[in-house]
Amino acid sequence: MRKWQAAWPWGHLSGPAPSEPSTTARLAPTESLARMEAVVNLYQEMMKHADPRIQGYPLMGSPLLMTSILLTYVYFVLSLGPRIMANRKPFQLRSFMVVYNFSLVAFSLYIVYEFLMSGWLSTYTWRCDPVDFSSNPEALRMVRVAWLFLFSKFIELMDTVIFILRKKDGQVTFLHVFHHSVLPWSWWWGVKFAPGGMGSFHAMINSSVHVIMYLYYGLSALGPVAQPYLWWKKHMTAVQLIQFVLVSLHISQYYFMPSCNYQYPIIIHLIWMYGTIFFLLFSNFWYQSYTKGKRLPRVLQQNGAPGTAKVKAN
C-alpha cells in the first residue's frame, strides 16, 4: 500500500490500490490503430494507381460520396420510403415518368454513340483491347463516356424512388435493388482505374438495352393510347438475357487468348461474374413469369403474381 501512496497523489485515501492494466489491455488499442493504419496505407497505395484523367470529374475524388449515396438509396427504398408512404395516397407521376423515361432513351442512345466513336468503331478489335491511358482525343473521349455511363446509373436510382412514391412496392424486388446498387458501386472502381478498353463493352451493351427498355417504359407511361404498341412486353426479359450472354461471351475471350495485355485482369473476372450472376437471376425471373406463371389462374397472372412488370432491374 505504501508503494501506491508514494506514487499516487491521493495515496492517503483509503481503498484498494488501483491495479496495473494488463498487457493485453495495453496492446489492444495499439493493435487496432496499427490495423487501421495498414488499411489507410493500402487505400492510399491503391489510389496512386488511379487514372489521373478522371480525377476532376464529379463523384470521382473519393468512394465515400458515391457509397453514401448508394447506402442512402438502399435505406430509403427498403425502409424510410415505404414508412413515409404508408399512410399517404400514391403520387400520380405520369407526366414526370414520360419525360424521365424518354430523357433516358436519348441519354442512353448518346452514350452508345460515344462508346462507338471512342474506339469500338475505330481502333478496338473487339477482342483484347487494353485501356489507352494516353491523352489523345479519342482516349479522353472514352474517359468522358465511361463517366457518363457511371453518372447514368445514379440517375436511374430514380426508377426505384418512383416505385416507392407510387406505392408499387411489389416492384422493388431483390433483383431490382441489387442491380441498381451494385452496378454503380462496382463501375465507379472501373472508371477510377480503367476507363475504357475491353472492360467497357458491357457498358455499351447495357446502354443499348436501356434504349429499348426506357422506350418501352416511356410508352407505357403514356397510358391506354400506347397500349396497342406494347405487344413486345414479354420480350423485354429475353433482351436482357441476350445482353448478359453477349457480355459473358465477349469477356470470356480473355481466358482463351495466348496473351492479352489488358491492365486490370480483376475487372475481367468481375464482369464475367456479373454477367453470369445476372443471367441466372433473370433466367429465374423468366421461369417464374413465363413458364411457371402460365400454370396460374389467368386473374393471378393479370394481377402480377409472377409480375412481368417487376423486372425493371436493368
Image: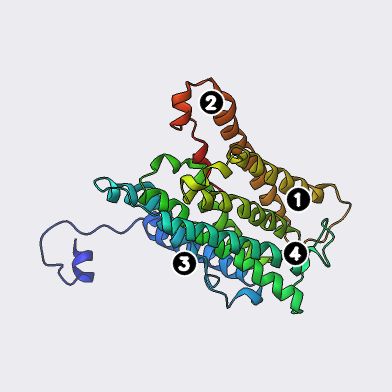
Q: How is the image coloured?
A: rainbow
The picture quadrant where one finds residue 153 is bottom right
- Determine which residue is flagged by label 4: 116
- Determine which residue is flagged by label 2: 293
Name the mark nearer the viewer: 3 or 4. 4
Gap between marks 3 and 4 measured at Cα: 30 Å
What number of labels is visible?
4
Mark 1 / mark 4, whichever is N-terminal: 4
Q: Is residue 89 above or below residue 207?
A: above
Q: Amino acid at mark 4?
A: Leu
Locate the N terminus and report the quarter of the image it occupies: bottom left
Mark 4 / mark 2, whichever is N-terminal: 4
Name the mark nearer the viewer: 2 or 3. 2
- Which element type, helix, strand or loop, lies under badge 4? helix
- Determine which residue is flagged by label 1: 251
- Determine which residue is flagged by label 3: 65
- Which element type, helix, strand or loop, lies under badge 2? helix
The picture quadrant where one finds residue 146 is bottom right
